[in-house]
Amino acid sequence: MHNLIEKVKIGVGLVTSVSMFACCADPVVSNYDGSMLWFQNELNSSKGSAVVLLEDSTPTLGLIREELAYLNLADTVEFSLDGDSILGNDGYELSVSGKTVSVHGRTDVALLYAAFDIMRQQNVDANAISPSRQIPSYDLRMLNHWDNMDGTVERGYAGKSLWHWDEITDEDVVRYKAYARANASVGINAVVLNNVNASPEILSGNNLPKVAMIADILRPYGIKVFLSVNFSSPMNLSGLLNADPLNPHVRHWWQDKAQEIYAHIPDFGGFLVKANSEGLPGPLDYGRSHSEGANMLAEALNLYGGVVVWRAFVYSPSDADRAKQAYLEFKPLDGEFADNVIIQIKNGPIDFQPREPFSPLFGALHNTQMAVELQITQEYTGASNHVCFLPSMWCETMNADTYRDGAGSTITKLTSQKIAGAKYTAIAGVSNIGDEPNWCAHPLAQANWYAFGRLAWNADMTPDSLATEWIRLTLPSLPLHAENTFRDMLLESHEAVVDYMMPLGLHHIFAWGHHYGPEPWCDVPGARPDWMPKYYHRADEKGLGSDRSKTGSNATGQYNEPLCSLYNDINQCPDKYLLWFHHVDWNFRMKNGQTLWNELCRHYDKGLTMTDHFLASWKRIEPYVDKAMWEDVNNRLTIQRDDARWWHDGCLLYFQQYSKMPIPQKTIYKLDDMMKYHINITNYECASKGYRGEKM
Ligand code: BDP
């Protein structure tokens, strides 16, 4: 379609321009149920009458016409399927002349993105459309669903899976379209339908037509479907004797499978692979390397333009320090991966903790196409009970300087540049979407889905701008003072979660299994040591924290200078990573002159106090928020406050056994009672209850 110059004129009839910011003093009562996500303004907007002057030539152009029915502008929007080659497939240019907005893009999907941009600008910037040229930071802006074929969602806190593998009903189709529209509106263009802990069944002949049905629904929205695959699939599905990537039978099996998939889904995106990690099979089982495994799959897909996204989330119980393992396994393979392989690296070296330093692997690979994997679902940040606006965490990683090629080698820069010959750049987020009517269970968790997409489109966006956009779209009638209060709450929420859960570089002191609450004391007989909190906090009479400096595991040695020296030096190491890299004396003097113990207590207290502030802030904006939404969020904020208390008391009382120093502020629980109490429930139940004092 590249050279086709076609104009699609959409004249929008004159409507009275309704300011999205007109202040509504009355409590807002609407038919809000959260299902409309950030399209709330549509509920009240007076629609313009869209007239398509040229016939639609693709389903996507048809969608643009539908979308522009929601425009409140009295302008004409003129779309042209042309533009500079620099725009690529997804980029577009907006220009404004008098009452006409002109849009140039080389594909219909690019024009769809532009249509969403115009609507967003109209609502965010009070009807002002600015001229701009938009080229996304990443080619593949991917959601990873961790959905199982039985309908459960691993680490999902918003109900069951959207995908119904037994039967896709008409109702499902409506829902899938709404899902696709939401993704397209923020630029997400690739979705992995199933869990990285993949069932081989996903590739069975019975399932592929269903995958194809979903792909057909998502296609007009510019979204490609990917699947997570199990490395042993040839054995499980066809009885092959092994899955050795150098075995010609295995190679043929994958080639045949690729052919079969592409017969169903001609634009199939490719495979996501978790191999030799947490008990899953992989090439290492046959003495082969990750590159041999990935390249075998890459060869099978290459003929059709498919990609292999191979995860670097690998660790085994035998090695010394889990934080070092991805680097140790992947650095020696730099440059060995095929052009259509992308290595997907979690933001931190352990596992989506509330705060981690960035994974040193980003600063170590020069000739390998890398993607960042972020977690949108709140596995380690309070499930769908706690407000935690994640862009604060994500931007910390993306903006981190790895010094790989000298100063300025940020993770955004390294991952958004294509290495020589590579087919795509990519970024991935583990989805927080389920079949709850409002998609994400916590109304404010929708902001994380929104922000992930927008950040993947424009990695230079800030938490502040992301929050502003989302608030204005989702709560269009908030007056400015309420908007400010709300935005402050979102922007402070991640640091608050870090403070009441794991300040100063503490990590993975979560309860066994559900990862929701604290269990620094957790001790499951016979369990892998690297699944035990004690492996991470190392509390003893002397102090607290993991020694990953030169005197310890030397994980600091995996960082480029000057970070290696900075992290190595206990006196220089940033406070936020101190206990990540050092075992620190309880009486150690922190940069502000406080002892470690007092500083630890102060952070836990600060986090807890913030949860009270959030309740107070939410109360202040009650008059401007839909009643149902307000109450839902208020309940969750109350649970969050109670949970923060649980974290505060549990962690400080536990560590006090070692520090033997007084806790300056009050605690209300008893450690013995807390240690006896274990919420032993499924993800979803956990999400609806939280830790509540009255249960004890
Ligand atoms: C961890 C989760 C586990 C996932 C794993 C992964 O606890 O459920 O399977 O990551 O990313 O965060 O593969």
Image (tube, rainbow, N blue to C red):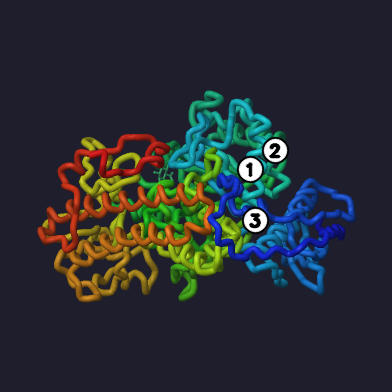
Q: Tell me if 181 is positioned left or right of 606 in this view.
A: right
SS at badge 1: strand
Element type where label 3 sits in the image: helix
Tell me the number on the disc at residue 552.
Answer: none
Residue denoted by label 1: 225
Q: Is residue 497 left or right of residue 653?
A: right
Q: Is residue 592 left or right of residue 341?
A: left
- Residue 530: % across, % down: 29, 46
Q: Quadrant of the N terminus?
A: bottom right
At label 2, which amino acid type do we have?
Ile
Q: Does 252 appear above or below 615?
A: above
Where's residue 666, x and y in %? 18, 58
Decide: is 306 above or below 286.
Answer: below
Characterize the local packing of mark 3: few (<14), some (14-19) or many (20 or more) Cα atoms within 10 angstroms: some
Quarter of the image where ligand 1 sits = top left
x, y percent for residue 21: 62, 65
Q: Earlier in the sequence, mark 2 or mark 3?
A: 3
Q: Are marks 2 and 1 in contact (CB under 8 Å)?
A: yes
Residue toward you, 71 or 516: 71
Mark 3 Cβ and ligand 1 under 8 Å apart: no
Q: Name the residue located 54 percent from the left edge and 52 percent from the top edge.
A: 626
Label 1, label 3: how many angstroms apart (C-alpha)? 30 Å
Which residue is the site of mark 2?
265
User: Of the residues tagged 2 and 3, which is closer to the observer?
Assistant: 3
